[in-house]
Structures are given as structure tokens and as C-alpha cells.
Image: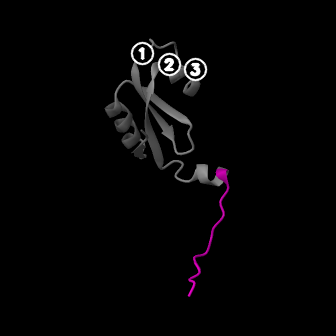
Amino acid sequence: MTQHDTTPRIEISTTELAALGEGHIAYVRPIRSEEVKALFPQAPDVTPGMDLFALLSANGTPILLADSRDVIVANAVANDLHTVSLH
């Protein structure tokens, strides 16, 4: 006897998927100072070899750059954002 999955399927575009959580969820991403210009083109030059943290919106838009994860999380909390970490 074969069972069929009768769960309804919802199709969602990549644009719609990227917008989920926008304004509510942000993610914390550890980065190296060499990556700063790619995420934050307007940022001043940063000393190479530094470990930093970036706060990005659910769709990947950069919000904040700091040298402390605690600063990033505090900023997210102050702006009513729930944070998740990426490794």
C-alpha cells in the first residue's frame, strides 16, 4: 500500500522568501575586516586581519558593523529585531 503526501504545497519566489522576517529578524555574521568593503562599501578602510561582526536584515541588507558581538545584539534588541547567528 502506497501512502501519498496530501500536504498542500505553497510556492514562494526567492524574492518573497527573502522578504520573510524583514523588519523582524536580523542575523549576526562574523566577518574578517577584508570582507567589510563587500558588505559595507561606504565604510572607511579597516585594518586587515581583524575579526568583526555584521548585523544584516533578513534579506541580507547590511545594518551595522562592529568589533563586538554584544554591540551588534544590543543594537538589534534596541530596534526590536530578533537575531539569529550564521556560522
Residue 7 screen position, x and y as percent: 57, 76
Residue under the point 38% across and 40% down: 78
The one nearer the camera, 46 or 87, is 87
Q: Which residue is mark 2?
A: 34
The answer to whether marks 2 and 3 mark residues whose Cβ atoms lie closer than 8 Å is: no
Q: Mark 1 sits on what residue?
A: 49
Residues drawn in magenta: 1-14
* Residue at 65% over, 51% down: 14
Q: Which residue is mark 3?
A: 42
Q: Secondary structure at mark 3?
A: loop
State the residue in front, 59 or 7. 7
Mark 2 vs 1: CB contact within 8 A: yes
Query: Which label is found at residue 28?
Result: none
Please rate how many residues cluster around mark 2, counting C-alpha atoms within 10 Å: few if below 14, some from 14 to 19, many from 20.
Answer: some
- Residue drawn where x is 56% and y is 54% of the image: 20
Q: Is residue 3 magenta?
A: yes
Left or right, 84 with reference to 9: left
Which amino acid, mark 1? Gly
